[in-house]
């Protein structure tokens, strides 16, 4: 079997007017990364010979997101056909399959794209067998179609009696009988690279939007007696993101996929629909994730970790056997060691909590180390920021930090030290020492009772005066 080469053109120059956003549409995130990054990750698995992304003017952010793949700028946004014309130089001399995909349709799978490529290759073999029927047998364009619940504004695929594709009609240009067609254009197509330039040359813009529609290459090819085909796929892969509502629908689909994968890999999600994952979330075996837990990007969780409800985790690593939450917030750079515990209303940032340490209640640990088996009492705060600089707090192993302690960084607490509750610790404490900073304990017998008596009498006098 000869391997047909693949080039990919990603169209991403659209402004995404319906998003009502200052950010290019394809930069809006799904599962914690721009939608274009999802698409690029899928496309890379196809190992294309060439890949070029068509962007609009002033879309450096998109160029950065797709690097090292090259971009070309479509200066004026004159339609999907015009956008492919902008990629012409990048395709110069290429005679394999050209896949066109849309940046705003990022959920397509590599398997589906492979089926699309196969549809053209199978036809090629047929073509070699029956050279005489070359023109009919080899589809120059194969389009990925789908049957959405609501065909709405999608282009309609007009299919002939023997299942070949005759035309793609945009909803805005369609006659009522064409609008009634339920088979829609996903936008993704595979085109014979050798024929593409000739087809693009003949695109016009005489239509409802006054744009050069790429979709018109189908009827142009048909007019030349060439054949075109359709491969059908699942709606969930082809949802085109044009509005914030579409973005939310796509997010729901991505989340569903990520949850299914996490469970397949051995994590329990008690209430999967309330757990939000990122594209790169790594959960080990026998991890238990309670309801309403959010994983922002960059989280990896070891085996047998339990994450209790209502936690927010971002850029953290958690080692085997640790227990987190409920209501914990772990921020970038938090490293939670094996069998450690982080409890409710605890925030940890850029800090390591080493093996078996406990930070169980109402605590902020930032820019710090908490040594193995150390116990951090409720209400402990590392005062890591003076408004100008951030400083480090180093707590050794086996220490005991009493409740409501303020550790004023930079400060070092030695192994095995004990800090008395309520202390403000601004100087280093040696190993195995006890440190305590506390105002003198004052007790005045009967003071409270006498206070109440006096104030009650004063109040009664004021009220009597008002009545006069
Ligand atoms: C397009 C298809 C429609 C299909 C639908 C699927 C055409 C004419 N219509 O419609 O048949 O059902 O997608 O989602 O192709 N773009 C550019 N430059 C341009 C115009 C568009 O790069 O000048 C890019 C956009 O950034 C976007 C993609 O092409 O990623 C599709 O453009 P869009 O305007 O969203 O097309 P639809 O109206 O959705
Ligand atoms: Ca679109």
Image: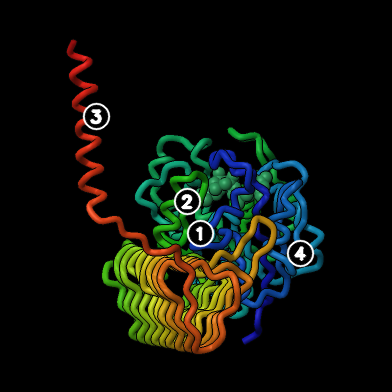
Drawn side of residue 211 relative to residue 287, left or right: right
- Residue closest to the eye, 281 or 396: 396
- The image quadrant where one finds the N terminus is bottom right
Q: CA distance from mark 4 to mark 2?
A: 26 Å
Q: In terms of sequence position, does the residue under pointer 4 or pointer 2 come before the other?
A: 4
Q: Quadrant of residue 140?
A: bottom right
Q: In terms of sequence position, does the residue under pointer 2 or pointer 3 come before the other?
A: 2
Crowd rating for badge 3 (residues with CA inside 10 Å; few <14, some 14–19, many 20+): few
Residue denoted by label 4: 70
Classify mark 3: helix, strand or loop: helix
Drawn side of residue 288 relative to residue 165, left or right: left
Where residue 201 sits in the image (x, y, percent)? Answer: 75, 49
Q: In terms of sequence position, does the residue under pointer 1 or pointer 4 come before the other?
A: 1
- Residue closest to the eye, 199 or 310: 310
Q: Residue at x 46, y 84 (%)?
A: 399
Residue denoted by label 3: 458
Residue 223 position (above or below residue 370): above
- Residue closest to the eye, 296 or 380: 380
Foreground disc of the pair 3, 1: 3
Q: CA distance from mark 2 to mark 3?
A: 65 Å
Residue denoted by label 1: 30
Residue 247: assigned label: 2
Classify mark 1: helix, strand or loop: strand
Classify mark 2: helix, strand or loop: helix
- CB contact under 8 Å: marks 1 and 4: no
Crowd rating for badge 2 (residues with CA inside 10 Å; few <14, some 14–19, many 20+): many
Q: CA distance from mark 1 to mark 4?
A: 23 Å
Where residue 382 sits in the image (x, y, percent)? Answer: 53, 68
Q: CA distance from mark 1 to mark 2?
A: 8 Å
Q: Residue at x 46, y 35 (%)?
A: 175
Question: Does label 3 point to a residue whose CB lies under 8 Å from ligand 2?
Answer: no
Q: Is residue 89 among what the camera can see?
A: yes
């Amino acid at each position: 079997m000869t391997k047909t080469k693949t080039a990919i053109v990603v169209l991403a120059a659209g402004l995404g007017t319906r998003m009502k956003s200052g950010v290019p549409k394809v930069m809006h995130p799904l599962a914690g990364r721009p939608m274009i990054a999802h698409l690029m990750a899928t496309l890379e698995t196809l190992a294309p010979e060439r890949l070029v992304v068509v962007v609009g003017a002033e879309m450096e952010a998109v160029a950065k997101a797709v690097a090292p793949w090259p971009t070309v700028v479509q200066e004026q946004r004159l339609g999907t056909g015009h956008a492919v014309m902008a990629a012409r130089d990048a395709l110069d001399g290429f005679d394999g399959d050209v896949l066109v995909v849309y940046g705003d349709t990022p959920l397509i799978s590599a398997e589906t794209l492979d089926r699309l490529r196969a549809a053209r290759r199978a036809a090629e073999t047929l073509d070699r067998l029956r050279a005489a029927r070359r023109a009919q047998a080899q589809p120059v364009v194969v389009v990925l179609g789908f049957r959405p619940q609501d065909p709405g504004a999608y282009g309609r695929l007009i299919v002939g009696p023997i299942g070949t594709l005759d035309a793609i009609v945009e909803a805005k240009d369609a006659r009522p009988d064409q609008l009634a067609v339920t088979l829609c254009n996903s936008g993704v197509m595979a085109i014979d690279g050798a024929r593409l330039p000739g087809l693009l040359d003949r695109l016009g813009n005489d239509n409802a939007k006054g744009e050069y529609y790429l979709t018109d290459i189908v009827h142009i090819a048909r007019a030349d007696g060439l054949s075109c085909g359709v491969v059908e796929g699942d709606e969930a892969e082809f949802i085109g993101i044009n509005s914030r509502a579409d973005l939310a629908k796509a997010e729901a689909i991505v989340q569903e996929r990520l949850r299914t994968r996490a469970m397949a890999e051995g994590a329990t999600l008690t209430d999967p629909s309330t757990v939000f994952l990122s594209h790169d979330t790594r959960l080990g075996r026998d991890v238990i994730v309670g309801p309403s837990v959010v994983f922002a990007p960059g989280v990896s969780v070891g085996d047998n970790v339990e994450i209790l409800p209502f936690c927010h985790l971002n850029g953290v690593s958690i080692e085997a056997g640790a227990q987190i939450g409920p209501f914990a917030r772990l921020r970038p750079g938090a490293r939670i060691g094996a069998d450690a515990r982080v409890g409710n209303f605890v925030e940890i940032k850029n800090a390591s909590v080493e093996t078996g340490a406990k930070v169980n209640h109402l605590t902020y640990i930032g820019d710090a180390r908490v040594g193995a088996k150390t116990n951090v009492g409720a209400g402990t705060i590392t005062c890591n920021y003076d408004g100008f600089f951030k400083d480090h707090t180093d707590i050794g192993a086996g220490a005991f930090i009493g409740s409501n302690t303020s550790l004023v960084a930079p400060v070092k607490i030695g192994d095995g030290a004990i800090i008395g509750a309520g202390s403000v610790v601004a100087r280093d404490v040696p190993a195995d020492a006890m440190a305590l900073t506390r105002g003198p304990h004052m007790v005045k017998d009967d003071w409270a009772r006498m206070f109440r008596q006096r104030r009650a009498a004063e109040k009664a006098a004021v009220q009597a005066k008002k009545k006069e």
